[in-house]
Image (spheres, coloured by chain):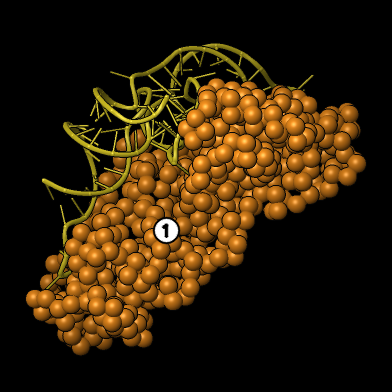
Amino acid sequence: MKQEIIDIVQAALKRLEKQWELPEGIKTNIEVEIPRNESLGDITTTLAMSLAKALKKPPREIAGEIVNTIKAAGRDNIFEKIEVAGAGFINFTFKREYLYQSLERLLSNEYLFLRVDIGNGRKVQIEFVSANPTGPLHIGHGRGAAVGNALSNILQAAGYKVQKEYYINDAGVQVKMLGQSVYAKYQQALGNDIKFPESGYHGAYIESISEEIIKNTGNKYLGTSFDECGNFFMNYAYKKMLAQIADDLRDFGVAFDKWQSEKELYEKGDVDDSLAVLRQMGLLYKQDDALWFASAKFGDDKDRVVIKKDGEYTYFASDIAYHKDKLDRKFDTIIDIWGADHHGYIPRLRSVLKAFGLPEKKFKVILIQMVSLLRHGKPVQMSKRSCEFITLREVIEEVGADTAKFIFLTRRADSHLDFDIDIAKEQSAENPVFYVQYAFARIASIFRQAEEKGVQGFKGSGVQGINLAFLKEAEEISIIKKLLQYPMLFEGAALSFEPHRITFYLQELAKLFHSYYNKHRVITDNEALTSARLCLCRAVQAVLEEGLKMLGVSAPERM
RNA sequence: GCGCCUGUAGCUCAGGUGGAUAGAGCAACUGCCUUCUAAGCAGUGGGCCAGGGGUUCGAAUCCCUUCAGGCGCACCA
């Protein structure tokens, strides 16, 4: 739909360019959008208005010339009308025949029709969640997982080769702290009254890991110093946590292609190697006994330390190595999804990638804002310190993975989200995921009915011999138009990395369908009409299914 | 103090790479089940797009500024 308009307008523009004497360097990329109000037309372009200045002519006059040229070239055959309106919009309204033909194309090859190829097989890497393996995933990580997963699905459908990756911070002091916490709990449980580490982890999971160790090894380490047996506790605890995180993500329906260990980067020598490259470029220097990276040269506020004066690497050092590794793997675009509280970290990492020669546009950080959980309309207090936070596991068990994912995707990523657990549990109109799934299930039910009644004609595939011109109710035309908008919507979501656009679209489409369903019967005594309506139902179902698939949410046949 | 994000209907939020009369869901009120799932539908009301200035043919959208909220400003991760 969009491409046809662009082609037609482009052709007209080409003819007009000669007589217009358009100044060089004026951009003539044609912006196409859906009009705000359906009565204005099906699709519109603002081209005339954006050319007005360069041509020194009123926009409406330019629009008129474009429309006349389209008509003169006979390219207006798919339109019922083309109008110049408002300040200079060119509004196109399609003929019914065009709508039917498009619907037919959708039905005969869903993926080809719905999935706009903008990726061309280019490689994209999306790193998300990447929570420290020092505790269970909480609800905020769940939001990151939902967004990363949906974005991966969208980009993959848009023709990118996508790799989903989880970065494991298993090298730093946090893992050591985890080990110390478990060690302390272990000693205490066995009667050795040692002090619990000052900033140790306090969650119940610390206790259960320690109990597990006691069960497996008895009092083997009772009284042994942490220096001697610390590695055991660290490894045991973080591997346990990592396994639990992997389980949670699996049950949430999010699968990663690669789990990259930070420790491994050190062991392979990647950290030293990447620093050596920066040193060769003259971007590292010593000052106050520490080693600095000249990130300010690339837009950071100040330079950053990579090796502290005590000889230890900073967290930033391994991040340099990790992102260098991403570049070496020849990704066209690198996307990092972080909690919004890490936003201050963006300039320094951007500096690294710039230093290594990646164009700015090829690195994208998506920030995930906080989730506050509401129960009985009141916020549930969560604090990291006391470990009173709602885990992703609890959310999955309480409301289900589908609902949680959908709700996480009902907001822009960088906007705060109130997650109302009572609404999420409620199976009603208030709960948007059921509303959309219900539309899908209803259609499935219609097809079961049609099957039972032995309706001939459309059986769920193929439109041969079916006359779609029977679809002439206003609701039917609206639905067809909405369906045809999906590719544009999808393309926009992919280009802007915004999965939530699909969530909104699905709710709108479901609304149109529920409304139609209540007003008109699909299965009627008129077989030709029934067949045409079943075609429409199938198309709605296909688009709902496709959209839900992008969000990582299931489309149930029955509810 | 500096930086980033946010401020849109009673509530929760879309719209934000400038475009037409600013939308949705919820809440409130009124109707609709002998017919394909009422987890549904139809209707009604609801707005100085935080305030002020600017750029533009045109601003919720871009720029400046004020106010309010959140989050960052380590040789922590």
A473 shown above or below A342 = above
For residue A330, side relative to residue A373 (left or right): right
For residue A331, side relative to residue A77 (left or right): left
| Relative image position of residue A259 (x, y in whole percent) | 44, 73
Can residue A169 be seen at all in this image of the molecule? no
Please give the name of the residue rendered at 84% of the width and 48% of the height, measured from the top-left corner.
Answer: A462
Quadrant (top left, top right, bottom left, bottom right) of the N terminus of chain A: top right
Residue located beneath label 1 in the image: A361
Please give the name of the residue rendered at 35% of the width and 35% of the height, measured from the top-left corner.
Answer: A377
Quadrant (top left, top right, bottom left, bottom right) of the C terminus of chain A: top right
Near-viewer residue (A329 or A477) = A329
Q: Colour of chain A?
A: orange
Chain that bears disc 1: A
Crowding near the residue tagged with mark 1, few <14, some 14–19, many ≥20 C-alpha atoms within 10 Å: few
| Relative image position of residue B32 (x, y in whole percent) | 66, 17
| Dot 1 amino acid type | Lys
Can residue A117 be seen at all in this image of the molecule? yes
Please give the name of the residue rendered at 38% of the width and 60% of the height, measured from the top-left corner.
Answer: A360
A116 shown above or below A452 = below
Residue that sits furthest to the left in the current view: A288
Q: Colour of chain B?
A: yellow
| Relative image position of residue A252 (x, y in whole percent) | 49, 58
For residue A374, side relative to residue A115 (left or right): left
Near-viewer residue (A455 or A50) = A50
A85 shown above or below A447 = above
Q: Quadrant of residue A349?
A: bottom left
Is disc 1 placed on a helix, strand or loop?
helix
Near-viewer residue (A407 or A508) = A508
For residue A123, side relative to residue A206 (left or right): right
